[in-house]
Amino acid sequence: MAVRPMTPSRKGPEALVVAAAGAGLGWVVGVLLHPVVGTVMAIVGGLNGAVSGWRRVYAWRTPEGVLAFLVDSTWASLPTAVGLLAHLAAVRRGGYDASLSVRQNRHVYRRGAYLQRGMSLTIGNVISSAGDLGAASRRRLITDHEAVHVWQARAFGPLYLPLYGLWSGGGAVAGTILWVRRGRREPVGKLIESCSYYLNPFEWWAYSRQDYWPPAGKVAGLGWKRPAARPLAAVRAARAGLAAEVAGEQHAGD
């Protein structure tokens, strides 16, 4: 999708309005817990609104876009706040990709923060280290896998990062125990990676949506056998078929 450049004079008003709205939402919700929480959430909501408004990220004409903004400014303030740090890491290296960001409710950087070289990292509404987005497979990774993590963070809000981290830590322990019980015949690193990363329910969900379960890096026969959800490609195809069918019926009625 070609994205037409927008001049700073046209970006400015949206950035100001979204920043003010995000700060207001954060304050109203956060102050119900504590004035300090309200202040922090107002800052996060304002900063996220300024950056996202400047880059025209939210799809205002869709229910998903409005919901994404509301949740990023309130319930998902914690992952949104950590995502602001990911912005800083990515901006220093450049590589912002507008084609996968503008009006798509997320920020995508070709470079930036990562935990493992060659793998993308999604925190809040920021996807870093997306890599060579000229490749169709890499773009599909962003739209069908990493974008799932963006919405997971919105759905689970302040629980998302702690739950993900707890599973990763517990999985590392489980992988080590499994390595010992199996007589130390398999590489301990592969078992730990499988238990802490690939079997993490959030990753199982995202890989399933990507139509890539089981992934090649997982130890064969370990953990979840079936996908957690229907692939997004199949969902899109079904929607397109339904839309074509409805259009055909309307045409026949005419």
Image (spheres, grey):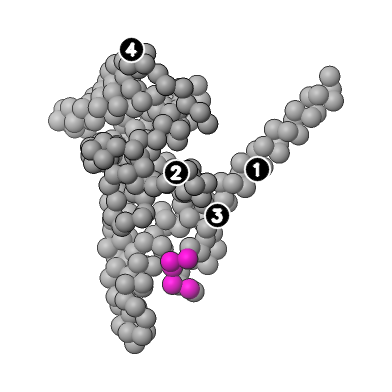
Of marks 3 and 4, the one in the foreground: 4
Nearest to N terminus: mark 2 or mark 1: 2
x, y (%) of residue 171? 32, 66
Tell me the amino acid under the disc marked 3: Asp
The kind of secondary structure element at disc 2 is: loop
- Cβ atoms under marks 3 and 2 closer than 8 Å: no
Residue at image mark 3: 211
Circle 2 Cα neighbour tier, 10 Å, few/some/many (<14 / 14–19 / ≥20): some
Q: Is residue 104 magenta?
A: no
Residue 156, percent from left and from top: 37, 44
Would you identify the image quadrant in which residue 46 lies?
A: top left
Q: Residues within 10 Å of mark 1 (few under 14, many from 20)?
A: few
Q: CA distance from mark 2 to mark 4?
A: 29 Å
What secondary structure is found at the residue carrying circle 1? helix
* Gap in angstroms between the C-alphas marked 4 and 1: 39 Å
The C terminus, quarter of image: top right
Q: Residues within 10 Å of mark 3 (few under 14, many from 20)?
A: some
- Main SS, magenta residues: loop
- Give, as a three-letter code, the residue at label 4: Ser
**Residue that label 1 marks:** 237
For marks 2 and 4, the one nearer the N-term is 4
In magenta, the rendered stretch is 216-220
Identified by mark 1, the residue type is Ala
Amino acid carrying mark 2 in the image: Leu
Disc 4, SS:
helix
Tell me the residue that label 4 is attached to: 9
Residue 21 can be seen in this image: no
